[in-house]
Image (cartoon, coloured by chain):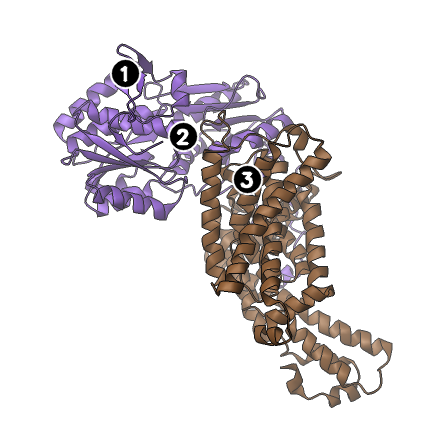
Chain colours: A brown, B purple
Amino acid sequence: MVADTAPHTAPQAASRGSEPANPPAALQVRAWLARRSEAVAIPLAAVAAGFLLFSLFLLALGKSPLGFLDIVWRGGFGSPFALQNSLQRAAPLLFAALCVALPARLGLVVIGGEGAIVLGGVAAAAASQPLAGAPPLLAIPLMALAAAAAGAVWIGAVGALRAYRGVNETIASLLMSYIAIALSNHLIEGLLRDPQSLNKPSTRPIGEAFAVGPMPGMDVHWGLGIGILACLAAYLLTERTTIGFAARIAGGNVRAARIQGLPVGRLVTTFTALGGACAALAGFFEVAAVHSNANASLVAGFGYTGILVAFLARQNPLAILPVAFLLGGIEASSGLIQRRMQLPDATVLVLEGILFLAVLLSETLYGRFRVFSPHLWAGKRAAAGVPATVQA
Amino acid sequence: MADLPLSRRHLLGGAAVLGLSALPLVRARAAGNLTVGFIYVGPKDDYGYNQAHAKGAAALKALPGIQVVEEENVRETTDVQKTMESMINLDSAGLIFPTSFGYFDPHVLIEAKKNPKVQFRHCGGLWTESNPKNAGSYFGYIAQGQYLNGIVAAHASRSKKLGFVAAKPIPQVLNNVNGFLLGARSVDPAITLQVIFTGEWSLAVKEAEATNALIDGGADVITCHVDSPKVVVETAARRGAFACGYHADQSALAKDKYLTGAEWNWASIYKGFVADMQAGRAPPNFLRGGLADGFVKMSPYGPAVSEAARRNADAVKAEMMKGGFAIIRGPLKDNKGNEIAPAGRTYAENAIELEKTNYLVEGVKGSA
């Protein structure tokens, strides 16, 4: 299980309890900064270490790591085109990562977002049919709602199986994902199939009126904007509400949460359902903003890249934003890497895999560096008053 | 978007610590030359659909004045739009081949509208008059190859049961299944064919399971229509069954168990398109052809193919080379007993009805 914010909150509580007189505001700010910088510095160091390892791989192939970075920069970040390319790729990853990060608050590892994405896309396409002729401002949210409901039921069922029947949610979500894709294929090739779609079975088109357009001034669809809002909302939910607090308690220690009278079963079902709803929105945007119908191209692997994003972001909904952008950029540059460096597409997968391992390994480093200790910066008296073991 | 200057100064912060020299970057295209972009949905060495296209691309690399840029594993999402734009903006590609079926609608259509000066040719025969004029499609009658596969398979089979691993029950796949059985039945009308649909274009585990199930059911010659026939051909050979190839030449994977195969020959189409571009013409918008046009070819016969089988297949191939060869010939029923073609009715390879095939012919076990 990946550690959540527990290591940060513990010293916080400890330092509050151990400060007989409030230290000056400047010292408090320094302490706060020290605590926060740990959460930034360690992942950054892990990414840098991961890239150093990857450089060895490149050198072994006789390619230049700096040339590689240059191409990643130009392909993913260095021009308006590259930036929009990265943002476009980041959009579905935001939703897919939330499907992992929200249940992770309860200590659950849900890896079946791919199925919810596909099912959400099919639900949105199906909902568009009876809505034909309705005003788009009404119909488009209803399509999104249909998608979210499908995803919520699907992943929520995984949560319910976990909470009430003790079924392992990781395995269950993966298997449910396979079922979702098979079910979607069945619907696309059967009940919902547009008879006009001969060699590429698809649902009937949603119609131009219901198409979701690009965001103003950009060549990126609204999935990005809504995805950012979803991440912000998820952050507020987990960090700033009682429900989020209860979820974190249950994630930290289920038995303690039960003894406290927290409705663990309902919390688990709610958070997995919310995650599923988020993933399904990615499917909604793929249909409404990209494909204009549901077809097999919905199975694009966003759900799996989303797992990577969520873990790199350490399950923090706010951190998902930069991480998804970074991975979107790396994927955007993958084409240039193939074309300019004559490296296979798998190169980017190798890089992503190494970064993933580096960040996972770095989990063991939290609380080990005195430089990040708030007590060091909050003034000597406070530091002396706290035994080192409190941080462990 | 203008070309980016190839400055190496835009390094990511912190990267300079590595202190390693940058690789000299190759600048694509000089004035007057043509850059051709190829986009594949899977790996370009998949022994299948993508490799067949990559072989066509490789044939262009040798031509003077031609620069080839390639990208593999590009998803059928906005990813492929961005790849096309990147090839146009950064590599100045003038002709683009997005080769996967799912790239056409909406991705190729969107980019063709956005970039009226660039020519897009898509593999699959989906282009119609209402689509942008700088787009187009090309495809081949590869069911002819499966018919020849069937003839060779019939001579090799002892159990008189053949097997077919198919991706999806769509017209192009069904035509191949029907072609394979009808070719075999032209040799021995008692032969039957079991087909298993995996539901996905690329799903190695299910393809292996399907191959094993077919062989367990008594089939002794297996062929397929999936993106990469590698797993099917290897599994069949390992189980001691014969294999007929598809898309590309898989003889290296099955050695003496490989009979022959129906292969794409995209190089001839690509060379023609490039010649058009260099002569200042737009390549044709809609192009289809079969064995006679050089769009499809057969793998060389394997050592297990008997002399009689070679003579039989070569004779039919010679007929096909004349054009107008009909695989679907009445009287013919589908495997549910419905009549497909009355006596005397034939559908030649270019018959438009074959684009809508939704049946499996009599003798095929399985349902579309």
Q: Chain of mark 2?
A: B
Q: Measured from the top left, where is residue B109 in percent x and y? A: 58, 27
Residue neighbourhood size for the residue with mark 2, other residues' Cα within 10 Å, grouped as few (<14), some (14–19), many (≥20): many
Q: Nearer the viewer, mark 3 or mark 2?
A: 3
- Characterize the local packing of mark 1: few (<14), some (14-19) or many (20 or more) Cα atoms within 10 angstroms: some
Identify residue type, mark 2: Ile
Going 85% across and 76% down the picture, which residue do you hit?
A: A26
Upstream in the sequence, badge 1 or badge 2?
2
Q: Are marks 1 and 2 on the same chain?
A: yes
Check disc 3: other Cα within 10 Å, few if <14, some if 14-19, many if 20+: many
The chain to which mark 3 is attached is: A
Indicate whether A199 appears above or below A383: above
> x%, y% of residue A350?
49, 56
Q: Is residue B21 left or right of residue A61?
A: right
Q: Is residue B253 visible?
A: no
Q: Which residue is mark 2?
A: B170
Q: Which residue is mark 3?
A: A122
Q: CA distance from mark 1 to mark 2?
A: 20 Å
